[in-house]
């Protein structure tokens, strides 16, 4: 009985976190589409860290930084990722 209880809690937590992540994704896209790059960058950065380095969120985050003319910050983020994943050739192109 105790195992079932833990299983239900796990499923409930997973469902809740998926819904919250989906809402944050929509919010970030809305900010990006409306040209509110500063707000979008904050949400995309948070999503990127939450999802264990999802490339889509990282690319959108860099797009926001580029639109804000924060090239030094974008370069620093790319260098951090290069240190973590030196074999990822896409990062060298960015």
Image: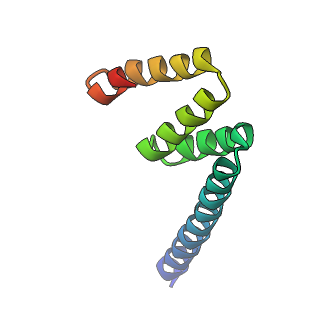
Query: Percent position (x, y) of residue 67?
Result: 63, 31
- Say which quarter of the image contains residue 73: top right
Q: How is the image coloured?
A: rainbow
In the picture provided, is 87 more to the left or to the right than 80?
Answer: left
Residue visible at 31% across and 20% down in the picture: 86
Looking at the image, which residue is at 53% across and 23% down? 77
Question: In the displayed image of the protein, which residue is found farthest to the bottom?
Answer: 1
- Could you tell me which residue is drawn at 59 percent across and 18 percent down? 71
Q: Is residue 17 visible?
A: yes
Seen in the picture, residue 35 relative to 2 is either above or below; the reply is above
Image quarter in which the C terminus is found: top left
Q: Nearer the viewer, residue 34 or 57?
A: 34
Q: Position of residue 81 (x, y in %)?
A: 43, 25
- Residue 70, picture quadrant: top right
Q: Nearer the viewer, residue 51 or 30?
A: 30
- Count the labels in the image: 0
Question: What percent of the width, then of the height, locates residue 84?
Answer: 39, 24
Nearer-the-camera pick, 45 or 17: 45
- Report the side of 33 relative to 83 (left or right): right
- What residue appears at the point 46 percent right and 17 percent down from the top-left corner? 79
Q: Is residue 88 among the parts visible in the rendering? A: no
Picture coordinates of residue 87 (x, y %)?
Answer: 25, 24
């Amino acid at each position: 009985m105790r195992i079932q209880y833990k299983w239900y809690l796990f499923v409930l937590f997973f469902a809740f976190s998926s819904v919250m992540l989906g809402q944050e994704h929509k919010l970030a896209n809305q900010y990006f589409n409306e040209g509110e790059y500063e707000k979008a960058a904050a949400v995309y950065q948070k999503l990127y860290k939450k999802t264990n380095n999802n490339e889509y969120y990282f690319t959108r985050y860099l797009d926001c930084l580029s639109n804000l003319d924060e090239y030094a910050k974008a370069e620093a983020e790319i260098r951090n990722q290069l240190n973590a994943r030196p074999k990822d050739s896409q990062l060298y192109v960015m």
